[in-house]
Image (cartoon, rainbow, N blue to C red):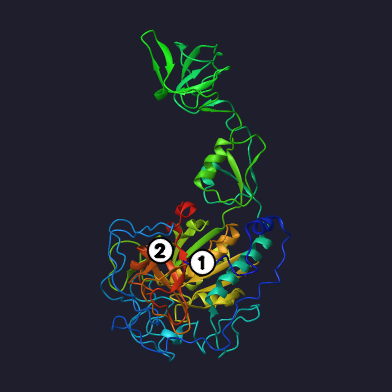
Amino acid sequence: MVSPGTRADDEDLGVEEALALLRESPRRPQEDPGPSHGDPGPSHGDPGPSHGDPGPSHGDPDPSHGGSGPSHGGSGPSHGDPRPSHGGPGSSYGDPGPSHGDAGPAHDGPGPSRGGPGGPSHGNAAGPSRGESGPSHRGSDPAHRGSGTSQGAPGSSPGAPSSSPGAHHRATPWPDARAVAERAARSAARAARREPVSVPLDEALGLTLAAPLTALTDLPSFDTSAMDGWAVAGPGPWAVRDEGVLAGHAEPAPLTDGEAARIATGARIPPDTTAVLRTEHGRTDDRGRLHPVRGVVHGQDIRPRGQECRGGDQLLPLGTLATPPVLGLAAAAGYDTLTAVPRPRVDVLVLGDELLTGGLPHDGLIRDALGPLLPPWLRALGAEVRTVRRIGDDAGALERAVTTSDADLVVTTGGTAAGPVDHVHPILRRIGAELLVDGVKVRPGHPMLLARLKDDQHLVGLPGNPLAAVSGLITLAEPLLRTLAARPAPERYALPLRDAVHGHPHDTRLVPVVLRDEGAVPLHYNGPAMLRGIAAADALAVVPPGGTRSGQEAELLDLPWATAGIGVCFT
């Protein structure tokens, strides 16, 4: 296995730098030029037909062929990589059937917009697409539109889409979009002057320490027994006291030479004790005298005061992530609260008149998959999800929700294309938001966007299709929230793919995989409207344009619940 190494972006924000931003004076950074457009030419869609279900496409027009090779069954992956697999019992790690997500031909022409013939196509569950347009495909896709309504915004940064009618829009390359999100968070942290907060231990899981953790006392704070047995003084045999020594009691009376006392693990050592004799290393005779069955070493099985640390020692540095062991150490060292970087606050706005919150889909209505999916995922990224509001396709309600939110980040679902009820772009223009990323060269999820609402507030617009929305979370929301929370960037790593993966001609693909035996197995059901693949996955493989061969290494992005430690925190 060859690791790509540490993050290559020289401007990547270190944890200590991020913490320093908590008290910096607000200023607009000079390094954030808005979206990066590395592609000198226009962004291209998929020139050929997709090869999934021959029926009409409601998803991503890229050649995501669903299955990327043979089926891989089993009750759970077994792999050598230390990152655990979390498919769970009965999870499917591959499917013998074809993928049905990328169906139908990709259209180069403008095509009917969302809401054209066949009814609106804007769901966020398996079914019609919202954002990664269905029948309209490239015609209404802001990431590839050559004409139509402007996607610019007053005050948009250099390189942002032009506000002039007919301007040709170019999507941002995937790595550049992630870098823009990090810089946007850096800018927001400077502007907000976010102060550290004091958080009770039971609420601090997943936060970043904004001050070093310094021992408030010696650990242990008194000499303690490391084992159940006897505290003994001098050489044996010993006369055993009637009264034993238990943990949590006051200091016992001193021992005299030739005397022993029963003692429990963690109990205070009586003064003048020579050693602790473990229960299994001693025996008593018929007169009740204690004899050792092996040699006794002075000080054995005694934890002396200050063995782990002395009061005032630094236990953990600034910038440490508060994992469960960190919380335990803090409690042992005498802490009731921790000084930490505050969680970024997030409001989630779920759009679409067609969404149901219960029961079976019916009469053109579909279940809302993103309402249940997004809040725990955002919490796993370190955010405080304050509200989840279902707004439907009401432009006025959406504008009021966006303009009245005081969250650090507003996340919307759907409505990022250019159909008749895709309101996100018009609202952003109307309120003077600054588009930093308007479409990303990634499949699924290319109509995603990132906008600056205020100096210290941003909006991430996710496509409505579930897997496309996950792509937007990982591409834009994760680096932004991670930087705001001063969390360390995950180490990049790569594994060989066990099967070939078809690639988009020009865009990056994110493909669910399961980790197994020092490799990654691509999963089926990876179309933009599908969650079946990602539900069984350990990671997403970053597949470059053109695809990968069987055995070729690909960068992997761990999913929050598939990583050891803090990633499993969803509350």
Q: Between residues 254 and 136, which one lies in front from this camera angle?
A: 254
Label disc, if present, on residue 301 of the rendered structure = none
Say which quarter of the image contains residue 40.
bottom right
Q: Amino acid at mark 1?
A: Ser
Return the x and y of residue 365 as percentages of the image width and height. 32, 71
Q: How many marks?
A: 2
Residue 456 appears in the rendering: no
Return the x and y of residue 32 as percentages of the image width and height. 66, 72
What residue sits right under mark 2 in the picture?
518
Disc 2 to disc 1, how far (Cα)? Answer: 12 Å
Q: Secondary structure at mark 2?
A: loop
Query: Can you name the residue that lies furthest to the left here?
Result: 96
Query: Does residue 288 lie above or below 153 as drawn?
Result: above
Few, some or many C-alpha atoms within 10 Å of disc 2 (few <14, some 14-19, many ≥20)? Answer: some
Task: Identify the residue at horizontal 52%, vertical 45% (top origin).
Answer: 203
Q: Secondary structure at mark 1?
A: loop
Label disc, if present, on residue 3 of the rendered structure = 1
Please state if 367 lies on the left or on the right of 193 as rendered.
Answer: left
